Image (tube, coloured by chain):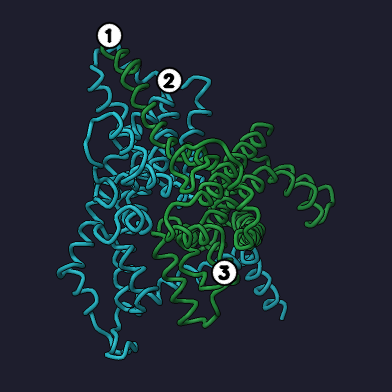
Chain colours: A green, B cyan
């Protein structure tokens, strides 16, 4: 029959091709990171040399530490901010609520060059703060808050709020209720939001590129500076780490959500 | 006195949301709204002969967008954003449909396999793509060694490479919302239309597409906006030959330091992006908002 031939043959074939298209470049990069080829674009026998090289490059270590610091601060601040604003939007009805929600959403629907560029001009021309850790972290928090907010809002719509009321009725004060009831209830969403934001912040190149200035070389910025020298196996090895890290993060997130 | 205290108390009650909403509202105003305002302001200024900013209002930067090379680049950005969107839809819809309807117990794994690439550093992925389609890359070496071609074909630094890179980077953002829409589609409606004698094509047009409209619009909005603002893909895969609006923004903000010119381009693509969001929500209805949020 026409329908089944369509769904049975064409769709799987097309889907397989799309999967190959999406995965082949990354897989080839991972494979070449173990290749003995000096340019990292041909297979010439197995080696771990490039991994040792990367581990022994101080610039890479510096960039990694900077990226980790920035991503950690971003995750903590944005997740807390996202939880607080989500709570406010979920619990209260006030004038301008819809407008505020749209405004918070704005960084998600703005081209990243505009977000990065606008923040760059704002930092240098209006606030006059030097470009560095502070400007990068502010930028990362700005594009992470909407992510955190929506992950947490989604969870808030599904949890049983009567537990919170019960706790208050039974005489627990706000802080105790928060510590014993609200936060544990929201914990899966808080973890999911952190697991989502960390790679976003860690991977971000475009917005960081605009607001980093000269000194703050995060790992993606370091990779970009290396691209000028053409293909090198070092990029393959760092790239492999970048490909493996989010896979681990997503799997972690998946299992955490499954458990709940 | 008591009345005043009561009034203050009532006012405070009304503002009970402020401690929760205030900080992020302030942050959003300071780091989202104000920077956009600054851009808009600068876009109306011009640059003097010494590179200094002249503080008198003018529309020159915007009028310049309709001339010569700028117009070409802006039109190219729109064309690429539109073209890649159509390609993503043509590939993404069948894929999302297949996963949601035929994925069975592998559904979650299959959709994860679509999402994961978009969660890895996109600079790295583009670099990986670049080494494959390059002059000495994998595709050319395979074609050469199988004697299909006699000299390497130019893929890199062509409009094709840029569109390929955009589709490669952002396809998952089209698949995900459509998948969610097809997932929540009532299967009995599809069966009913089949029982009533609808051809597969009729079924697609009259049942499946209208019911998954929200997902399609959400994916379209995402991909269009991202593609319109692309900067890295044309930089890496297009070179100087295939520039897009985002490259102009970076060129003026970082390389040249002509803030008014860069601001006008940034403001223009933001305006187009917001217009697309508005139209998408208008045409796709509330469903889009739910999918987006």
Q: Mark 3 points at which residue?
A: A216
Q: Judge if badges 3 and 1 mark residues of a common chain.
A: yes
Q: Which of marks 3 and 1 is nearer the N terminus?
A: 1
Residue occupying image coordinates x 27% and y 25%: B204
Mark yes or no: residue B287 visible. yes
Depth check: B135 or B110 in front?
B135
| Residue B157 shown left or right of residue A179 in the figure | left
| Residue A237 shown left or right of residue A106 in the figure | right
A204 lies above or below B183:
below
A175 lies above or below A4:
below
Return the x and y of residue B217 as percentages of the image width and height: 34, 43
B110 lies above or below A118:
above
Q: Which chain carries label 2?
A: B
> In the drawing, what numbered circle is on residue A1?
1
| Residue B273 shown left or right of residue B197 in the figure | right
Q: Mark 3 lies on which chain?
A: A
């Amino acid at each position: 029959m026409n329908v089944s031939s369509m769904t049975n043959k064409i769709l799987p074939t097309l889907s397989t091709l799309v999967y190959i298209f999406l995965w082949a470049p990354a897989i080839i990069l991972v494979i070449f990171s173990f290749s003995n080829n000096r340019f990292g674009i041909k297979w010439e026998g197995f080696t771990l040399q490039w991994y040792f090289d990367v581990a022994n490059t101080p610039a890479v270590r510096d960039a990694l530490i900077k990226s980790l610091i920035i991503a950690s601060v971003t995750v903590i601040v944005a997740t807390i901010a996202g939880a607080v604003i989500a709570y406010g939007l979920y619990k209260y009805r006030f004038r301008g609520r819809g407008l505020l929600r749209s405004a918070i959403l704005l960084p998600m629907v703005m081209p990243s060059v505009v977000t990065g560029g606008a923040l760059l001009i704002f930092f240098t021309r209006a606030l006059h703060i030097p470009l560095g850790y502070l400007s990068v972290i502010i930028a990362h928090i700005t594009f992470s808050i909407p992510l955190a907010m929506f992950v947490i809002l989604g969870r808030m719509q599904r949890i049983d709020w009567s537990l919170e009321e019960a706790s208050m009725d039974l005489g627990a004060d706000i802080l105790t209720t928060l510590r014993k009831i609200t936060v544990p209830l929201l914990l899966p969403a808080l973890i999911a939001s952190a697991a989502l934001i960390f790679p976003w912040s860690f991977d971000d190149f475009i917005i960081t590129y605009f607001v980093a200035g000269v000194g703050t070389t995060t790992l993606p910025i370091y990779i970009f500076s290396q691209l000028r020298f053409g293909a090198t196996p070092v990029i393959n090895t760092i790239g492999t780490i970048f490909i493996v890290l989010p896979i681990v993060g997503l799997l972690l997130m998946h299992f955490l959500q499954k458990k709940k | 006195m008591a009345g005043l205290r009561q009034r203050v108390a009532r006012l405070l009650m009304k503002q009970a949301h402020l401690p929760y909403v205030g900080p992020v509202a302030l942050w959003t105003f300071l780091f989202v709204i104000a920077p956009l305002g600054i851009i808009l302001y600068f876009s109306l200024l011009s640059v003097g002969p010494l590179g200094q900013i002249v503080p008198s209002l003018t529309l020159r930067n915007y009028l310049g967008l309709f001339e010569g090379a700028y117009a070409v680049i802006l039109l190219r950005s729109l064309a690429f954003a539109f073209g890649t969107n159509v390609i993503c839809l043509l590939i993404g819809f069948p894929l999302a449909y297949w996963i949601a309807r035929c994925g069975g117990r592998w559904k979650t794994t299959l959709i994860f396999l679509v999402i994961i690439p978009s969660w890895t550093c996109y600079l790295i992925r583009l670099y990986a793509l670049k080494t494959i389609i390059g002059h000495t890359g994998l595709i050319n070496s395979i074609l050469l060694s199988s004697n299909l071609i006699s000299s390497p074909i130019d893929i890199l630094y062509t409009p094709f490479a840029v569109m390929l890179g955009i589709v490669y980077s952002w396809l998952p953002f089209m698949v995900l919302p459509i998948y969610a829409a097809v997932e929540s589609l009532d299967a009995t409606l599809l069966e009913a239309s089949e029982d009533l004698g609808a051809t597969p094509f009729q079924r697609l047009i009259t049942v499946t597409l209208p019911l998954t409209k929200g997902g399609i619009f959400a994916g379209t909005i995402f991909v269009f906006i991202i593609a319109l603002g692309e900067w890295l893909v044309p930089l890496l895969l297009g070179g100087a030959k295939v520039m897009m609006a985002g490259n102009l923004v970076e060129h003026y903000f970082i390389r040249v330091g002509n803030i008014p010119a860069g601001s006008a381009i940034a403001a223009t693509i933001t305006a187009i992006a917001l217009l697309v969001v508005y139209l998408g929500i208008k045409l796709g209805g509330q469903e889009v908002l739910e999918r987006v949020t």
